[in-house]
Image (cartoon, grey):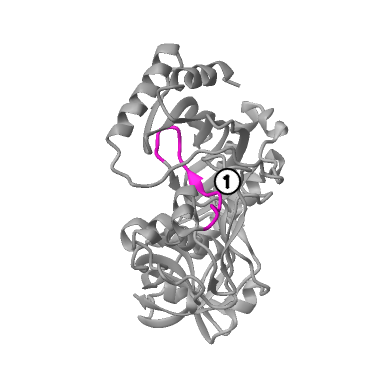
């Protein structure tokens, strides 16, 4: 696909750039939102773009276009070459024909691609209908949404590498607002999948409604240090918020709290954290990264010990290690590092066992202020939260909005147990419920 455009870029760049790399992305996205059983918004979008990366006398330059005519393709090569002249980076960059990955995750569903738009709208309408019927205290359903997307990517370089990948996915989410007396609470439920038949509108809606109604009539939190259980969704949120501590570039720049800790204990021995680009049920799975380097399952923390950072070929060369296949860039951007399917491995306990390990436990089911209240460089966080008080394994009541604070690294060391209820969020971060020895709670 797009052979003509690739050939023209390579031909034009030959003799002008020492090495050339082309990244193509072609995608479609669809979403529908329902309000009072009417389509409130209906969005269908196409996108495509080509990004060029060149190496000229050891310097790297980038340029991109969304216009695929011959003159424009020539212009972006010229622009990339010109940009290379002004590059201030001293990074040593090479392109190569990296070996193909033996494992190739199946990330495209032909059946999903055939689902009719009317079926998608019916699903979104059912989300709203069932949510409103779930409980008389539900007074509004602000979110009843279905969406899906498809993306084709191709990466080739002047060393002979040529890789391509097609992915698709679908998601649905429903948000409910519940009210009793003067108390109002929001609940959200979602599912992301490649199998349209897995969408159960009634189940999703009723789960969302229960999440909102369960939080009603909360009591004030008792300030102090308390054992805390993050439910699976909120543990995935915490993991995502601090994922950059594993970024090798930030480690090398001294912007990660894990700098200098390779081989040391950074978490409880029940904690294993991995980045798995080849996971069959992942939604960021791929056989190659944005450099064409073969991806892998990277064990970052094994039984509490720091084993690896996330690398592209540039950071790997500096650390004299192999890339982990986490090179990342879009056609508009420069090369960086990102997670793929990033997760904490599930434990062997059920959630009831976690909740029963202390006389009193605060369960956190909602977090706010992740961008403003968490500092990935220091690891410190102070976040708005909602949740429940448990006593002797019995849920006593919901808690009015409170603040939870601590340090991410200390929190991981203080993990006491991990449940077996693993779940991915919609951004490919995954976790089970996790019990932490103590965190600061402010009512």
Residue 119 percent across, percent down from the top left:
65, 31
Point 35% across, 22% down: residue: 78
Query: Is residue 380 in sight in this rendering?
Result: yes
Specify the principal SS of the magenta part: loop
- Residue density around tag 1, few if under 14, some if 14–19, many if 20 or more, within 10 Å: some
Residue 17 percent across, percent down from the top left:
41, 27
Query: What secondary structure is found at the residue carrying circle 1?
Result: loop
Q: Nearer the viewer, residue 398 or 193?
A: 193
Which quadrant of the rendered structure holds the C terminus? bottom left
Left or right placement of residue 47 versus residue 167 in this view: left
Query: Is residue 135 in sight in this rendering?
Result: no
On whether residue 67 falls in the magenta region, the answer is no
On whether residue 332 falls in the magenta region, the answer is yes
Start-end of magenta stretch: 321-334
Point 48% across, 70% down: residue: 262
Point 55% across, 74% down: residue: 304
Left or right placement of residue 388 versus residue 422 in this view: left
To which residue does mark 1 refer? 284
Residue 55 percent across, percent down from the top left:
41, 34
Q: Nearer the viewer, residue 257 or 254?
A: 254
């Amino acid at each position: 696909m797009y052979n003509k455009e690739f050939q023209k870029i390579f031909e034009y760049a030959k003799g002008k750039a020492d090495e050339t790399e082309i990244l193509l992305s072609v995608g479609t996205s669809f979403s529908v939102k329902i309000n009072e059983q009417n389509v409130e918004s209906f969005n269908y979008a196409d996108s495509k773009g080509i990004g060029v990366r060149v190496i000229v006398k050891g310097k790297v330059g980038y340029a991109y276009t969304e216009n695929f005519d011959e003159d424009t393709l020539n212009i972006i090569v010229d622009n990339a070459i010109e940009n290379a002249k002004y590059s201030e980076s001293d990074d040593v960059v090479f392109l190569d024909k990296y070996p193909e990955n033996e494992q190739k995750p199946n990330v495209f569903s032909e059946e999903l691609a055939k689902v009719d738009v009317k079926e998608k709208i019916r699903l979104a309408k059912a989300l709203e209908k069932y949510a409103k019927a779930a409980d008389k205290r539900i007074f509004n359903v602000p979110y009843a949404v279905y969406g899906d997307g498809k993306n084709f990517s191709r990466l080739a370089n002047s060393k002979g590498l040529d890789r391509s990948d097609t992915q698709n996915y679908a998601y649905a989410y429903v948000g409910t607002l519940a009210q009793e007396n003067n108390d109002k609470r929001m609940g959200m439920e979602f599912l992301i999948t490649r199998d349209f038949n897995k969408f159960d509108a009634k189940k999703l809606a009723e789960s969302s409604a229960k999440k909102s109604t369960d939080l009603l009539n909360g009591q004030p939190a008792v300030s102090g240090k308390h054992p805390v259980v993050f439910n699976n969704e909120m543990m995935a949120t915490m993991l995502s918020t601090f994922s950059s501590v594993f970024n090798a570039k930030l480690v090398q720049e001294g912007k990660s709290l894990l700098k200098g800790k390779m081989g040391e204990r950074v978490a409880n021995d029940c904690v294993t954290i991995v980045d798995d680009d080849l996971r069959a049920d992942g939604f960021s799975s791929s056989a190659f990264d944005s450099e064409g380097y073969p991806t892998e399952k990277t064990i970052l923390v094994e039984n509490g010990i720091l084993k690896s950072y996330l690398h592209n070929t540039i950071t790997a060369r500096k650390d004299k290690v192999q890339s982990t296949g986490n090179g990342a860039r879009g056609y508009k951007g420069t090369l960086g590092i990102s997670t793929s399917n990033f997760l904490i491995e599930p434990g062997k306990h059920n959630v009831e066992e976690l909740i029963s390990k202390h006389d009193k436990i605060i369960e956190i089911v909602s977090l706010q202020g992740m961008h403003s209240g968490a500092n990935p460089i220091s690891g410190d966080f102070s976040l708005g939260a909602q949740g429940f008080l448990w006593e002797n394994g019995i849920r006593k009541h919901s808690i009015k909005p409170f603040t939870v604070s601590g340090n991410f690294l200390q929190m991981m060391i203080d993990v006491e147990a991990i449940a077996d209820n693993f779940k991915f969020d919609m951004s490919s971060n995954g976790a089970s419920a996790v019990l932490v020895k103590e965190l600061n709670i402010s009512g």
